[in-house]
Image: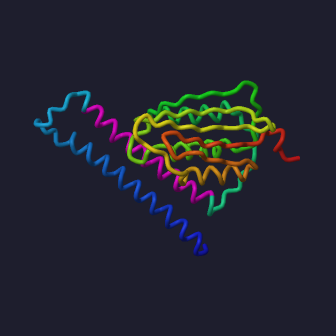
């Protein structure tokens, strides 16, 4: 591993450590309130459930941040060589939707009709989309708090397939540039012959993954 690669790994691990520290503090803070059961706080049952939910979502977010970090490092430095296969978009989107709903996320899905199968790897394309969604999520809030997510797929004028990942902040959150999840997604999509673009910087952000139809990209 050369100096540039070591610096990249060090930076990624440092970013994970910062995110983990923030999330651990969230968990400790809210569970400490529940653990002490201080009568002076006069917490209603609904408030207790809310605090428990915040702690739970912070733990879930920690797991997700670690998964994205480890998979990025694996994909870039192992490296992973994908074996392209025909992937049904409805199967791919269903996997992503199921995961996000398990995290309590508000996600809207729109699929155009008659979309072809795409050239990809089901596991890694799913990881790529989830990595982008992780980047679009606030580091300090649960998935479902003050964010809406829109996932769509449609054909393009040049015969390719566009998977669009969009996030809208319902509060004060401002989206910054793509992070490690977006970087990992770019590695996956480019190895499969596609491309990734990012447009963000306000209370809305969009990541576009352009992938090849199986018939176009299939090996002879």
Q: Position of residue 91 (x, y in %)?
A: 65, 32
Q: Position of residue 167 (x, y in %)?
A: 52, 38
Q: How was this image coloured?
A: rainbow
Closer to the camera in the image, 2 or 121? 2
What residue is shown at x 14% (from left), y 32% (from top)? 42
Please indicate whether residue 213 sits to the left or right of residue 74 in the image. Answer: right
Q: Residue furthest right?
A: 220
Closer to the camera in the image, 152 or 120? 152
Q: Residue furthest left?
A: 40
Query: Residue 144, located in which quarter of the rendered image?
Result: top left
What main secondary structure does the magenta stretch of the protein show?
helix
Quadrant holding the N terminus: bottom right
Q: Position of residue 77 (x, y in %)?
A: 62, 63
Q: Residue furthest top?
A: 113
Residue 2, placed above or below residue 28: below
Magenta segment range? 48-75
**Magenta-span inclusion, residue 176:** no
Query: Residue 156, located in which quarter of the rendered image?
Result: top right
What residue is shown at x 70% (from left), y 38% (from top)? 162
Please indicate whether residue 179 sits to the left or right of residue 33 in the image. Answer: right
Residue 80, placed above or below residue 45: below
């Amino acid at each position: 591993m050369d100096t540039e690669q070591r610096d990249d790994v060090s930076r990624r691990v440092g970013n994970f450590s910062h995110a983990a520290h923030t999330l651990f503090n969230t968990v400790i803070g809210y569970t400490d309130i529940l653990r002490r059961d201080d009568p002076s706080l006069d917490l209603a049952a609904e408030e207790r459930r809310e605090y428990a939910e915040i702690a739970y979502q912070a733990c879930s977010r920690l797991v997700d941040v670690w998964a994205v970090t480890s998979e990025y490092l694996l994909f870039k430095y192992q490296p992973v060589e994908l074996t392209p296969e025909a992937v049904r978009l409805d199967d791919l989107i269903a996997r992503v939707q199921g995961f996000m709903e398990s995290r309590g996320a508000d996600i809207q899905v729109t699929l155009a009709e008659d979309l072809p199968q795409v050239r990809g790897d089901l596991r890694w394309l799913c990881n790529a989309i989830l990595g982008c969604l992780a980047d679009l999520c606030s580091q300090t809030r649960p998935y479902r708090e003050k964010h809406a997510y829109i996932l769509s797929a449609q054909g393009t004028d040049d015969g390719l397939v566009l998977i669009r990942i969009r996030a809208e902040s319902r509060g004060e959150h401002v989206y910054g540039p793509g992070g490690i999840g977006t970087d990992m997604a770019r590695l996956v999509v480019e190895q499969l012959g596609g491309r990734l673009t990012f447009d963000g910087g306000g209370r809305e952000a969009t990541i576009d993954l352009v992938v090849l139809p199986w018939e176009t990209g299939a090996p002879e």
